[in-house]
Image: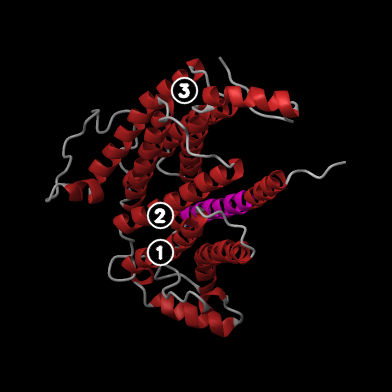
Amino acid sequence: MNAPPMHLAARDRERSHGAAIARWLLACAFLCFLMLVIGGLTRLTGSGLSIVEWRPVTGAVPPLDLRDWAVLFEQYRQSPQFRIENAHMTLEGFRRIFWWEYIHRLMGRVTGLVFALPLLWFWIKRQLPATLRMRLPAIFTLGALQGVMGWLMVKSGLVDDPRVSPVRLALHLGLAFVLVGLLVRTALTVREGAAPPPKPPSALARSADALAATVFVMALSGALVAGNHAGLAFNTWPLMAGSLVPAGLFPLHPWYLGALLDVTTVQFDHRALALVLALAVPGFWIASLRAPIDQRSRRWCHLVMATFLAQFSLGVATLLLAVPMALASLHQANSMLFFVATLGAGHALRRSATVELQGQALSDAIAHHGAPDGGDKVDA
């Protein structure tokens, strides 16, 4: 049997490297998702202020004996959360809230190592495509900034009021969404070896991008709701205080402070964005059913609709039941899945835009080399 041509062998190696890089990036994205879930539970259990120091390296070592626990508990006893909310807490109670925050921080360290060590390996082995040699170090830097932002958020609750800044909470969550979005989109591109589309993206692809941006803004809005404890007010749907548009919106000056810090305004904003998506997502999904797109794109569009329905239902239930922990955690976790679904749909639809132009090339390839092992079909 003749050996394959050199350019085909090189292409196979690139494809193999691309698949390995994609799996690694998706694993990092999954770890970030787990951090999001654990971070949400840390906030909901009131555990986020239990560790009052930030030691990026030595903080990875947990307390090993009773003396270590006594030192950490004494530090916590000086915090405003202990003085104002938990003055009767015992060492055993402190241990319960400590482990939530410790695991959340440990996951950040683990995720950083899982990203950095393979990055170094791929770099040394010269297996990184040129397009990733700046993007991946930038993503690592963004991850480090996420850790700094997390500490700044915690620090804001260690001064006088044992509540973290809602704005810093929103920035912390927003950076998590940006990180996961970059990891997932980069992984999809590398795995598929996609070249830039030869024509502008379709209206459906642009709609998916618009949905992703809206979901991102809504996630930030949800963080403001959580940071202001606004979910504990107006526990009715669809009305707020008997009205679709409640009185007293934007009471603070300057006006934008109301959108950040006023309970009524932040909850109204979150509801308004939910209603926007309640109109936009079904419209997008129906348009996808009518469009001549490939099966992969269609699956992503179905996932957008499914995650939206779950997100809307969880949000209403969480509100009506005054923020039970399980529902609130699921609501936050699914927001990330909803966001990823919109990103995946946008990516797949951009590739779908090239199908017609690739048709003749595919026919020629089949004629010369035989049918490929698999591939996506286009639905008319």
| Residue 290 appears in view | yes
Report the residue marked by disc 1. 145
In this rendering, position of residue 27 left or right of residue 261: right
Name the foreground residue: 94 vs 20: 20
Name the foreground residue: 373 vs 146: 373
Q: Earlier in the sequence, mark 2 or mark 3?
A: 2
**Relative to residue 262, is residue 116 depicted above or below?**
below
Amino acid identity at mark 1: Leu
| Residue 237 appears in view | no
Q: Is mark 3 on a helix, strand or loop?
A: helix
Q: Earlier in the sequence, mark 3 or mark 1?
A: 1
**Residue located at (46% from left, 76% from top):** 55
**Relative to residue 307, is residue 85 depicted above or below?**
below
> Residue 175 — which label?
2
What's drawn in magenta, residue-wise?
21-40
Q: Distance between the residues labelled 2 and 3?
A: 28 Å
Q: What element carries label 1?
A: helix
**Residue located at (21% from left, 31% from top):** 245
In contact (CB < 8 Å): disc 3 and disc 1: no
Question: Crowding near pointer 1: few (<14 within 10 Å), some, many (20+)?
Answer: some
Q: Which residue lies furthest to the left in this view?
A: 253
**Residue located at (45% from left, 69% from top):** 50
In contact (CB < 8 Å): disc 2 and disc 1: yes
Name the foreground residue: 64 vs 7: 7
Q: At which x and y percent is residue 222?
A: 36, 45
Quadrant showing the C terminus: top right
Q: How far apart are marks 3 and 1 (CA)?
A: 36 Å
Task: Choose top left, top right, bottom left or bottom right for residue 243.
Answer: top left
Task: Choose top left, top right, bottom left or bottom right for residue 158.
Answer: bottom left
> Residue 285 — which label?
3
Q: At which x and y percent is residue 141?
A: 44, 64
Q: Which residue lies furthest to the right in this view?
A: 1
